[in-house]
Image (cartoon, grey):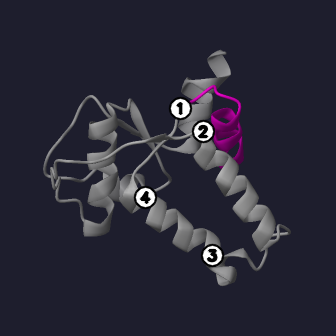
């Protein structure tokens, strides 16, 4: 499902957002060769897809740190980015950590790629 959500972003069905912390995290993941050992894609191909994805993203500067106190401190930036962007959802497979913050923000849903596909994209 993740691939379908990325494709939806690339063709303009969804509007992704990025900020400095998320960009650094994604650049790190894309460059880790050990994570891609079972993938048929080359590093150059991954970087091309990533660059295409970034070209569709709105760049958001986060000026206020909400610190929702998620179990994994390094995930707090995702909530802050979503709030700064006035995003409707954070799309992730890490539901367990992102739904357990001390601060609650009902305007931002935390959804898996499968949920986005079933609840949003299949309706088009």
The residue where tag 3 is placed is: 31
First reached walking from the N terminus: tag 3 or tag 4 = 4
Name the residue located 68 percent from the left edge and 37 percent from the top edge.
Answer: 10
Is residue 103 shown left or right of residue 99? left
Does dot 4 land on a helix, a strand or a loop? helix
Count residues near mark 1 (Cα–Cα under 10 Å), then give few for <14, some for 14-19, many for 20+.
few
Does dot 2 land on a helix, a strand or a loop? loop
The residue where tag 2 is placed is: 56
Does dot 3 land on a helix, a strand or a loop? helix
First reached walking from the N terminus: tag 1 or tag 2 = 1
Is residue 29 shown left or right of residue 38? left
8 or 55: which is nearer to us? 55
- Which of the two discs, 2 and 4, sits closer to the camera? 2
Please provide percent x and percent y for residue 32: 62, 79
Residue 114 falls inside the magenta stretch? no
Residue 11 falls inside the magenta stretch? yes
Q: Number of marks in the image?
A: 4
Region rendered in magenta: 1-14
In what quadrant of the picture does the C terminus appear? top right
Count residues near mark 4 (Cα–Cα under 10 Å), then give few for <14, some for 14-19, many for 20+.
some
First reached walking from the N terminus: tag 3 or tag 2 = 3
The residue where tag 4 is placed is: 22
Tags 1 and 2 in contact by the CB under 8 Å rule?
yes
């Amino acid at each position: 499902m993740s691939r379908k959500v990325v494709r939806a972003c690339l063709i303009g069905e969804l509007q992704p957002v990025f900020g400095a912390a998320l960009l650094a995290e994604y650049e790190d993941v894309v460059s880790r060769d050990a994570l891609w050992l079972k993938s048929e894609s080359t590093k150059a191909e991954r970087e091309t897809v990533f660059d295409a994805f970034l070209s569709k993203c709105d760049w958001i500067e986060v000026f206020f740190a909400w610190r929702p106190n998620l179990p994994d401190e390094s995930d707090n930036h995702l909530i802050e980015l979503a709030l700064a962007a006035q995003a409707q959802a954070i799309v992730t497979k890490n539901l367990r950590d992102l739904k357990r913050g001390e601060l609650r923000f009902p305007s931002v849903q935390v959804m898996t790629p499968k949920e986005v596909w079933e609840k949003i994209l299949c309706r088009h």
